[in-house]
Image: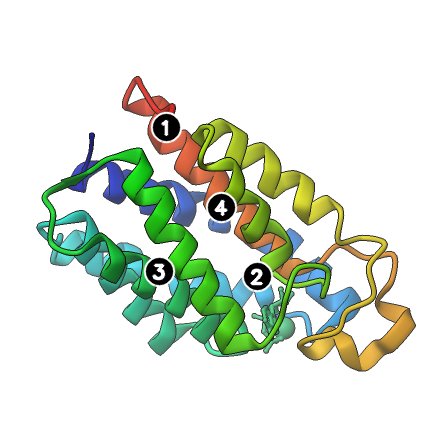
Amino acid sequence: MLDTDFFLRWMAATAAAVQREASRLTDLDAAIGDADHGSNMQRGFTAVTAVLEKDPPATPGAVLTLVGRQLISTVGGASGPLYGTLLRRTGKALGERPEVTPGQLAEAFGAGVAAVAQLGGAQGGDKTMLDALLPAVEALEVSFAAARDAAQAGALATVPLQARKGRASYLGARSIGHQDPGATSSALLVAALAEAAETSGGGDA
Ligand code: ADP
Ligand code: MG
């Protein structure tokens, strides 16, 4: 079972990864966007870390709902509302259970990713965060480690794609040949999930 502490570890590992990779995310966004994805995510997860330390929520669902709200109000850009929706919707789907199974998390995360697709009007292959998130949802049925690998592969697979959504789409064919920044940060989020599972000693779904 995955308890509230597991979700706090997931978010802490995400914050650490965002901190570590911020300049890389910004470099990727400099190539096909406006060079702010790293600082956007860093600002968001700095606020997330502060609020989770000050007011740790009591349930897994409440952790993700609070993180989502915090991201919406601090990240800005296209990615703020999208990541906010992802985590809020996932949290809402988990409900008020004190502990959840990996299967319940997989299902809730699927609902969160579907909400991102709906909000942004994007689908797989559009060179967005969905190219990491959609394969992760599928692989979550196997294990957290499989989801991490699938998200990473999905982010790498955005390189040859032409962007059809977001700022990068304004570049048309010039967006080809660069890895999508949002898919890259989504792969960090999913890798942090696998990391949280490893530190709890279990982790396979
Ligand atoms: P902005 O583009 O406003 O500067 P960010 O740089 O923080 O915002 O985030 C850019 C990332 O957001 C892109 O790399 C892409 O993955 C994601 N993104 C942009 N538009 C969409 C969309 N409509 N659907 C899904 N993801 C999107
Ligand atoms: Mg940007």
Mark whose residue sits in front, 2 or 1: 1
**Quadrant of the rendering where the C terminus is positioned:** top left
The label shown at residue 87 is: 3
Q: Name which residue type carries label 1.
A: Ala
Circle 1 sits in a helix, a strand or a loop, which is it?
loop
Work out which quarter of the rendered image holds the N terminus and state it: top left
Residue at label 2? 38
Can you tell which mark lies on residue 137?
Answer: 4
Upstream in the sequence, badge 4 or badge 3?
3
Q: Which callout, 2 or 1, points at the residue further toward the start of the chain?
A: 2
Residue at horizontal 72 percent and vertical 73 percent from the top = 33
Residue at the image point whose x is 47% and y is 70% from the top: 82
C-alpha separation, residue under disc 1 versus residue under disc 4 = 12 Å
Which circle, 2 or 4, is nearer the viewer? Answer: 4
Name the element at disc 3. Answer: helix
Which label belongs to residue 205? Answer: 1
Q: Quadrant of ligand 1?
A: bottom right
Among numbered discs 1 and 4, the one appearing first in the sequence: 4
